[in-house]
Amino acid sequence: MDISAGRTSAVKTLSLPLLSVIIPTRNRVKSLRLLLESLAEPARIGIPETEIIVVDNGSTDETHRWLDAQREQNQSGRLMILDEPRPGKSNALNRALSVARGEIFMVLDDDVVIQSNCLVKHAEAHVATQFAAIQGRILAGKDFVGNPADANRLREYNIPLIDYGEEIVAIRGLTGTNMSFKRVVFEKVGFFDPRLGPGAAGYSEDTEYSIRIRKAGFKIGYTPHAIVYHELNPSRYGRGYNRAVEYRKGVSRSIYRRDSVLTKVLPDLFANCIRYGIYWLLGRHDKVYKTEGRILKCCGYVAGKLGRGAGRVV
């Protein structure tokens, strides 16, 4: 698979900077293949100069063998494949950041595919705005057999969905599934916290990084034009998975936040339990689903503060 990255004359006029696309991956060889195919799509529009860095974070499926084959076929030299044996997405991101050459670092999860102009829209947003970090749009994609999402069931798919409208606007936080930031951000903010994210506490490596970005004086923006489509995985559907996700988010939050358990978290837990009962009696299933998640997040936070939420989460 040749993922060379030519530029059109129009893009040269814009002088788009070198973009380092960072993809941490673990045990998702099929999904990773689809993502790299979308990055190699010849029809992609106005691509800036690009290097693509894939970091295998201890995969035990066919990922390593498949990536070895891609390394041999890498005609352009723009594909870099790294191994990071230390578990955790943050460690994989940090491994890539330590060698990335770009002026813009873009992070993609390994279970998305990009719209053809996604990369250039990230780069253009950095050139055309004062934002130092950019959040792209994340929409529901298809499942493994090609079925599209049911618009009435989006919450049940338990995937990150980001859509703040049709305008470029300021926002407070990033979602690591489709985000980018300038080199100057990394130089001032540093690496991701290895205690957070998949493979560690479970979540929030992007949220905690966003907090540090803002504290460093940088602004975060959203562009609707840089779009990825998140795959639908039946193993993630439903309330059981949502409970586990929200609990791990609570555990992760306990690492980087200082909310008082007695005056903040336990009162929130009590209030949400009351709301849950009311919504259940009223048959408000959407509210029940959301409130149940809030309850589990509070429980995870308490468990984390008590030191009972540790363990690797893939």
Image (cartoon, rainbow, N blue to C red):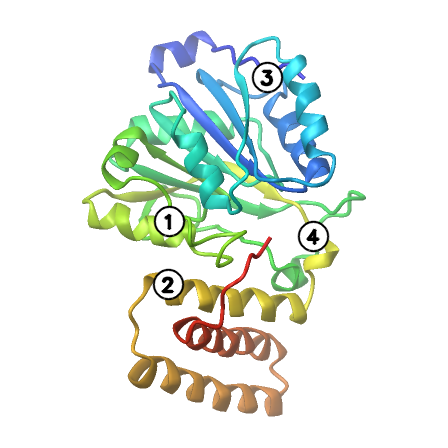
Asked whether the beta carbons under mark 2 and mark 1 sit within 8 Å of each other, the answer is: yes
| Residue 171 visible | no
Q: In this view, does 180 lie above or below 246?
A: above
Question: Residue at 18% of width from left, 44% of height from top?
Answer: 217
Question: Residue at 39% of width from left, 73% of height from top?
Answer: 305
Q: In 3D space, how far apart are the residues under numbered discs 3 and 4 (Cα atoms)? A: 29 Å
> Percent position (x, y) of residue 301?
43, 73
Asked whether the beta carbons under mark 4 and mark 2 sit within 8 Å of each other, the answer is: no
**Secondary structure state at the residue bearing disc 2:** helix
Left or right, 286 with reference to 266: right
Query: As shown in the figure, which amino acid type bears the numbered disc 1?
Result: Asp
Which quadrant would residue 18 be assigned to in this image? top left
Instruction: Please tell me which of labels 3 and 1 falls first in the chain.
Output: 3
Task: From the image, tell me which residue sits under label 1.
Answer: 193
Instruction: Please tell me which of labels 3 and 4 falls first in the chain.
Output: 3
Query: As shown in the figure, which amino acid type bears the numbered disc 4?
Result: Ala
Asked whether the beta carbons under mark 3 and mark 1 sit within 8 Å of each other, the answer is: no
